[in-house]
Amino acid sequence: MAGLGDGLAGTGGVPARQTIASRAKGGLVVLGGFVALLFAIEVVNTLMMGALTRTFGLRPRSADGLLDIFTFPLLHANLNHLLSNSLPLVIFGFLVFLSGLRVFLTALAFSWLGSGITVWLIGSGVTVGASGLVFGLFAFLLVRGFFNRSWRQILLAVVLFMGYGSILLGALPFVAGYVSWQAHLGGAAGGVVAALLLRPRTPARLRES
């Protein structure tokens, strides 16, 4: 048995570390590129005097607004709005990306759609911003450990909640009237759904064998 264990460690340890390193590098590239795209769009939107916001911002309960679901997180009200979303987006997105590209894209897609659909249904006024994605990725990180029965992921969730848990107040309608709590709430719900769909189909004891 000892020989088998040594063989597994010798052949699997280095590739496992390489996989984590490659995922980390990929996460930095993808998240860095995405945030760079957001800044480029903000520059163009500023030069166009907010024309992109008026055209592609999400307009609730309108037929055209259904297409805006796919564009509104790419726009922001101003540079400060974008800056406030950029750091948590990179942090949470990077941590999710460490679980793989498929996991990241699933969590991002459900956060995006959950945020947009909720705003379209119950939002008010033209809505822009990636904060729904931030809330979705954060919620995904908070709950996935319980679905996966992973103590390491649960511990990470506790640390993240201690550091960033206060942002969840932004999903409440009575906290701040100038933010889209609908986008926050919908994004968080999408993140939870993604974690639920990505949960392992086999019992934890079997996966650890």
Image: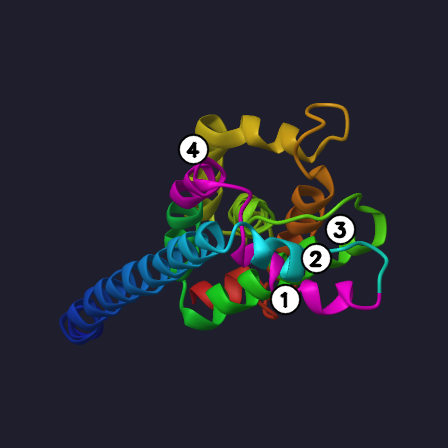
Query: Which residue is pictured at 68% across the width and 48% down the height?
Result: 127
Tell me the residue that label 3 is attached to.
119
Left/right of residue 84 with respect to residue 5 in the rendered view: right
Q: Are marks 1 and 2 in contact (CB under 8 Å)?
A: yes
Query: Which residue is pictured at 56% across the width and 26% down the height?
Result: 166
Tell me the residue that label 4 is attached to.
159
The answer to whether one can see residue 98 in this image is no
Element at badge 1?
A: loop
Of badges 4 and 1, nearer the viewer stands 1
Tell me the residue that label 2 is attached to.
116
Which amino acid type corresponds to the residue marked 1 in the rendered image? Phe
Which amino acid type corresponds to the residue marked 3 in the rendered image? Val
Count of picture labels: 4
Q: Are marks 3 and 2 in contact (CB under 8 Å)?
A: yes
User: Disc 2 versus disc 4: distance between alpha carbons?
Assistant: 28 Å
Residue 86 located within the stretch drawn in magenta? yes
